[in-house]
Image (tube, rainbow, N blue to C red):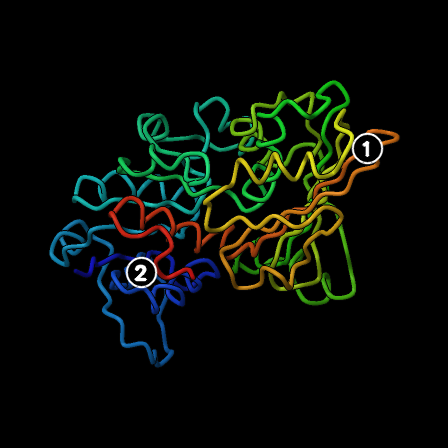
Amino acid sequence: MAHKVGVVGFRGYSGAELVRILARHAHFEPVLVEHRKDVEDHSARRDRLARIPCTPEAIRGEGLAGVFLATPADVSMDLAPWMLEAGAKVVDLSGAFRLRTPETYWRWYKEEQTQPALLAEAAYGLPEFCRERIRTARLVANPGCYPTAANLAIKPLVEAAVVDRKAGIVCDAKSGVSGAGRKPSLKTSFCEVTGNFSAYSILDHRHVPEVLLTSGLQESEFSFTAHLLPLARGILETIYFRTSVSRPEDLIEVYAKRYAGEPFVRIYEAGHVPDLRAVERTNYCDIGVKLDAATGRAVVVSAIDNLVKGAAGQAIQNMNLVLGCAETEGLL
């Protein structure tokens, strides 16, 4: 049985990626939901997908079981309440519902959270840690791309108490330009990006609280710096920490135990680390570790495709759970 699922924001990078992946999904029938009245689409769409206006009547009339919101946070806050009332399960790809309190949201996003009840209700959509909560949720907050790569690498180490937390953890993260979205800006224009490499949002990146909430770290224990790569897609994070374990195999064993049976996390052999090509256009997170036992210095490298495991792929993984499909459907 096919579930009709709507895609709002299908013109953006994450929305277009959703449409691409949904085209091969055996149990989801994608429907394009038009929420922008100021945009005239002159393109001749070859996909022939159904299109409906973004209204409660259309959502009910089309019988949508779920809706993906690939929209800015303020738009998601406006749309999510009445979509839930119309009977659709919602997976939101923005940051609107990822944090736990309006005060925390204001601190990091510098914007008002206008739906505090839904903020408290939303399930955080990192399946490897929140799977059972996601299955029963009406509203899933799809994680940010940087926190996905960071938490999958960091949380098992913190859980296993193999990190010297007093020494802190440093996360040096790099992303392709599509992570900034499709809206034009000087910073992401061709002449600014090509042949360049830059750091941004130093010490105040809005994804930091997601890492803290999931990993269990305190803000004083975690340093994060984002960088813009002159590439279209991909995230690679180099994470530095101190440990008392004596062999890299001990760290690999931590990951192997935590992710046994997980379909989308791949752990490399000791001394080997991933690169972006290994995960391009996949829903995998690849993790590799190196250790200098003499000094206790350790490095873990985590790589994902920011538009797939960092956005659309993980959103489909979450919707699979919410609507009772196989978690890997459409993604392998």
Judging depth in this view, the residue of 148 and 39 nearest the camera is 148
Is residue 67 shown to the viewer in this render? yes
Q: What numbered label is drawn on residue 275?
A: none
Judging depth in this view, the residue of 311 and 7 nearest the camera is 311
Please tell me in which quadrant of the rendered image residue 62 appears.
bottom left
Judging depth in this view, the residue of 285 and 210 nearest the camera is 285
Extreme-right residue of the structure: 294
- Sequence-wise, the earlier of marks 2 and 1 is 2
Judging depth in this view, the residue of 290 and 75 nearest the camera is 290
Left or right of 18, for residue 217: right
Which residue carries the number 1 mark? Answer: 297
Residue at 70% across / 41% down in the picture?
Answer: 300
The CA distance from mark 2 to mark 1 is 54 Å
Residue 136, percent from left and from top = 26, 35
Residue 302, percent from left and from top = 64, 47
Left or right of 81, for residue 60: left
Residue at 47% across / 41% down in the picture?
Answer: 143
Please tell me in which quadrant of the rendered image residue 209 appears.
top right
Q: As displayed, is residue 167 above or below residue 64?
A: above
Task: Give the quarter of the figure containing the N terminus.
Answer: bottom left
Task: Give the quarter of the figure containing the C terminus.
Answer: bottom left
Which residue carries the number 2 mark? Answer: 37
Please tell me in which quadrant of the rendered image residue 63 appears.
bottom left
Q: As displayed, is residue 153 above or below residue 324?
A: above
Q: Amino acid at mark 1?
A: Arg
Residue at 28% across / 36% down in the picture?
Answer: 137
Left or right of 179, for residue 301: right
Residue 277, percent from left and from top = 64, 64
Assess disc 1: are there few (<14), some (14-19) or many (≥20) residues with their C-alpha within 10 Å of its C-alpha.
some
Q: Amino acid at mark 2?
A: Lys
Assess disc 2: are there few (<14), some (14-19) or many (≥20) residues with their C-alpha within 10 Å of its C-alpha.
few
Helix, strand or loop at mark 2: loop
